[in-house]
Image (cartoon, rainbow, N blue to C red):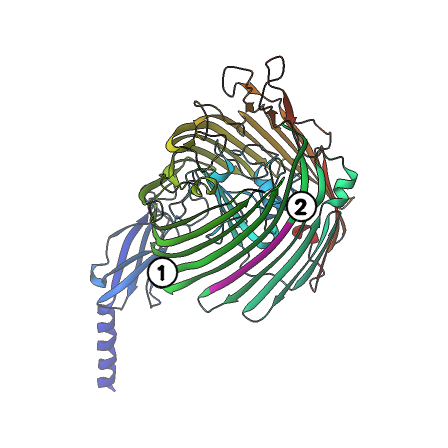
């Protein structure tokens, strides 16, 4: 018995002697003590927490090398691997978690629209409920600062750049013909349904090194990863009808929709300035298939669109008018995959293909052209830590174009080109703290057809000035190959170049956003030619240049007035360029010095209605009067438009919709066409180029059929 007690006493004594006390102090980067930090040895129950002075102390029986972990909310977890005998009087400094709420975001030159974006200014619902946008995502983004109102075109004109300087991507892959086919002074719209997308990034300048071949802007559209439910959507509007269906399986889902559009009912009611021989008519279909793997997601998108119209447009030089007919067929396929490779590596890859065919009739001349475009992309991303992430990848573009022009009693003219380029890019995101972050990258491209190689550096820096505000800087060089109408005649030109310098201020607080951005953009090596338009016999060069400078201001308020959301955008633009056939540097016709948009949305509970109104203003745009000695010295009158929409919620899944553009019928003038020869007085006569019609309206009924009877159809409008 005495022997047993002796052994027990010795065992307890040795156990007590084997206990090691771990001590230390926890502070933040400023030396301020952190109270309540969790301190423990990994894989054990031994640990404690820091007191109000940041001090901690606990005992352990563990020996040898051990891992000490220290964690606290909004800070990165601290890890130390060393022998427990050395874990005393530790001085531990926790670093802020740069991924937590309130961290700085890199946003200079970029508007994000999506529920998951820290710098979001528009949601997907905003895009399809903006009065005047007619459900077109392009129309909604035209209410943001940095864009110019060019209502006779319908595409995006960004910060002094023409519409060809903006590229559009779906899930990171290029869309080669994103707009419906049209003709001069008849506005186009995007080909794709807004219901496909979960979020959007609209870069008005300084965009990532991942993207190229655009001088001014990129618009990034991200499709829905997984639909929330099975449903059928039916739509009946005054100018067409559509149907859509979504089905889900265990790891798969399929969404399809089709839409038929015919503008004849609208053209019969609203007086037209164009003599329509065959009203605009189109049939389109889309399908999206998704498959979820264990560590990735595959998405396959396909879209087919057919459009046709025939009209006679007024022309001051042709008394009987100019007959123009068009038949367009467009096929677009997009396949993308994003997944994890383990060890904080992710892969994003995919390919897109487009075929666009046009059968055009201009008076007695027939033009038949065909374009095939291909894009392949591979991107890898490595997350080394919360503070350092690296992207790098490569992509290949291939485009072939051919055109046949047939003129009665003349030969057939043929033209074609191949435009092939290979690009590589790398970009690093570095977060020094929650307040300071940097993104730096470089892009290289080699064009085998035009035989050039260019390197484009990109960089941005953001600093959080307070819990609600931050400032950002961005710089980048951007190259773009000459456009199709030039390449089909000349394949020896250099790419055009622009350089962006951007300063941004952002304030966000309690559902209110204020954003101001100043920028300067220089243009070099712009394409010039010596004829009215590109021709086979034109003399081409890269001697053009120019600049664009301005200030963009955005304010959005979802809080101050109950049930009212509104945003206001203002842009000041100073731009001149010497390009195309310009005799000297001048402001182009599409660039207005002042642009203003005001968008309001008000929910009336008693009426179960969402009322929306949009006001657009643009100062007069310059045009050239050949009766004057100075080029582009005249200006049109100001542009004004008030648009209105009313969405009435019949039930949670049925909605009646009414929209009218330019409610007050403002007589807007976009430009003037002058006669080719002077009259008897020696002056050149002119005609005003106005909208095809003073107003545009839509009346529609939308119905969603799903098992979720509480689903709000207004969210799908």
Which one is in front, 268 or 258?
A: 268
Quarter of the figure with residue 493: top left
The answer to whether residue 713 is left or right of residue 101 is right
Q: Earlier in the sequence, mark 1 or mark 2?
A: 2
548 over 479 or under it: above or below:
above
**Quick one: SS at disc 2?**
strand
Quarter of the figure with residue 343: bottom left
**Quick one: SS at disc 1?**
strand
Residue at the spot 47% in from the left edge and 39% down from the top edge:
165
Which residue of the protein is positioned furthest toward the front in this rendering? 409
Is 494 inside the magenta-drawn segment? no
Residue 157 point in image, percent of width and height: 52, 35
Which residue of the protein is positioned furthest toward the bottom in this rendering? 1
Q: Dot 1: few (<14), some (14–19), or many (≥20) neighbours within 10 Å?
A: some
Residue 188 point in image, percent of width and height: 61, 42
Which label number is shown at residue 309? 2
Q: CA distance from mark 1 to mark 2?
A: 50 Å
Residue 160 point in image, percent of width and height: 48, 31
The answer to whether residue 67 is left or right of residue 243 is left
Start and end of the magenta stretch? 297-307
609 over 592 or under it: above or below:
below
Which one is in front, 6 or 62?
A: 62
From this viewpoint, is residue 657 visible? no
Front position among marks 1 and 2: 2
Residue at the spot 54% in from the left edge and 23% down from the top edge:
622
Is 305 inside the magenta-drawn segment? yes
Residue at the spot 45% in from the left edge and 33% down from the top edge:
505
175 over 551 or under it: above or below:
below
From this viewpoint, is residue 273 visible? yes
Residue 364 point in image, percent of width and height: 62, 41
Disc 1 to disc 2: CB gap under 8 Å: no
| Residue holding disc 1 | 345
């Amino acid at each position: 018995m005495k022997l047993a007690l002796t052994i027990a006493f010795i065992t307890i004594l040795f156990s007590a002697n084997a206990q090691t006390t771990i001590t230390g102090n926890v502070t933040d980067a400023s030396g301020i003590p952190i109270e309540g930090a969790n301190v423990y040895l990994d894989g054990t129950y031994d640990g404690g927490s820091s007191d109000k002075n940041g001090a901690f102390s606990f005992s352990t029986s563990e020996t040898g090398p051990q891992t000490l972990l220290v964690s606290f909310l909004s800070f990165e977890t601290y890890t130390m691997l060393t022998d427990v005998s050395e874990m005393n009087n530790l001085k531990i400094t926790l670093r802020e978690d740069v991924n937590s709420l309130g961290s700085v975001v890199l946003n200079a030159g970029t508007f994000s629209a999506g529920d998951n974006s820290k710098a979001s200014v528009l949601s997907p619902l905003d895009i399809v409920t903006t009065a005047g946008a007619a459900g077109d995502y392009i129309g909604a983004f035209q209410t943001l600062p940095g864009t110019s109102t060019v209502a006779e075109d319908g595409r995006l004109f960004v910060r002094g750049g023409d519409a060809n300087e903006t590229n559009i991507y779906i899930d990171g892959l290029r869309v080669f013909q994103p707009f419906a086919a049209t003709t001069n002074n008849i506005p186009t719209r995007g080909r794709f349904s807004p219901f496909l997308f979960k979020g959007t990034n609209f870069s008005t300048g300084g965009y990532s090194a991942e993207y190229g071949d655009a001088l001014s802007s990129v618009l990034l559209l991200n499709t829905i990863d997984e639909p929330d439910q099975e449903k059928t959507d039916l739509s009946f509007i005054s100018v067409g009808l559509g149907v859509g269906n979504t089905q889900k399986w265990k790891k798969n889902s399929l969404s399809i929709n089709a839409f038929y559009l015919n503008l004849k009912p609208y053209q019969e009611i609203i007086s037209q300035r164009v003599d329509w021989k065959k009203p605009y008519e189109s049939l389109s279909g889309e399908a999206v298939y998704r498959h979820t793997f264990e560590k990735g997601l595959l998405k396959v998108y396909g879209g087919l669109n057919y459009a046709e119209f025939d009209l006679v447009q007024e022309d001051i030089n042709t008394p009987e008018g100019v007959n123009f007919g068009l038949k367009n067929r467009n096929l677009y396929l997009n396949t993308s995959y994003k997944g994890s490779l383990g060890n904080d590596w992710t892969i994003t890859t995919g390919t897109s293909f487009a075929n666009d065919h046009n059968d055009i009739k201009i008076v007695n001349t027939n033009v038949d052209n065909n374009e095939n475009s291909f894009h392949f992309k591979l991107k890898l991303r490595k997350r080394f830590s919360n503070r350092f992430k690296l992207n790098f990848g490569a992509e290949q573009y291939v485009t072939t174009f051919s055109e046949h022009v047939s003129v009665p009693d003349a030969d057939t003219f043929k033209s074609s080109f191949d435009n092939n380029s290979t690009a590589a890019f790398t970009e690093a995101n570095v977060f020094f703290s929650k307040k300071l972050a940097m993104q730096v990258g470089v892009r290289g491209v080699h064009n085998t057809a035009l035989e050039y190689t260019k390197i484009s550096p990109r960089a941005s820096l953001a600093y959080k000035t307070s819990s609600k505000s931050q400032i950002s800087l961005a710089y980048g060089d951007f190259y773009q190959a000459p456009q199709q109408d030039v390449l089909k005649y000349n394949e020896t030109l250099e790419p055009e170049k622009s350089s962006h310098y951007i300063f941004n201020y952002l304030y966000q607080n309690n559902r209110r956003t204020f954003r101001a951005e100043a920028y300067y953009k220089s243009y070099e090596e712009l394409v010039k030619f010596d004829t009215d338009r590109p021709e086979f016999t034109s003399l081409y060069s890269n001697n053009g240049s120019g600049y664009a400078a301005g200030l963009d201001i955005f304010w959005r308020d979802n809080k101050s007035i109950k049930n009212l959301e509104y945003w206001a955008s203002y842009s000041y633009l100073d731009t001149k360029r010497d390009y195309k056939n310009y005799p000297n540097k001048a402001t182009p016709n599409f660039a207005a010095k002042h642009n203003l948009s005001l968008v309001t949305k008000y929910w009336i509970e008693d009426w179960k209605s969402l009322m929306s109104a949009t006001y657009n203003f643009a100062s007069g745009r310059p045009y050239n009067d050949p009766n004057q000695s100075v080029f582009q010295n005249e200006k049109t009158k100001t542009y004004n438009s008030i648009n209105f929409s009313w969405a009435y919620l019949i039930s949670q899944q049925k909605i009646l919709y009414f929209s009218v553009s330019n409610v007050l019928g403002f007589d807007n003038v976009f430009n003037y066409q002058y006669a080719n020869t002077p009259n008897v007085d020696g002056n050149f006569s002119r005609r005003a180029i106005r909208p095809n019609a003073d107003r545009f309206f839509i009346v529609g009924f939308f119905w969603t059929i799903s098992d979720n009877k509480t689903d709000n159809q207004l969210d799908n409008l």
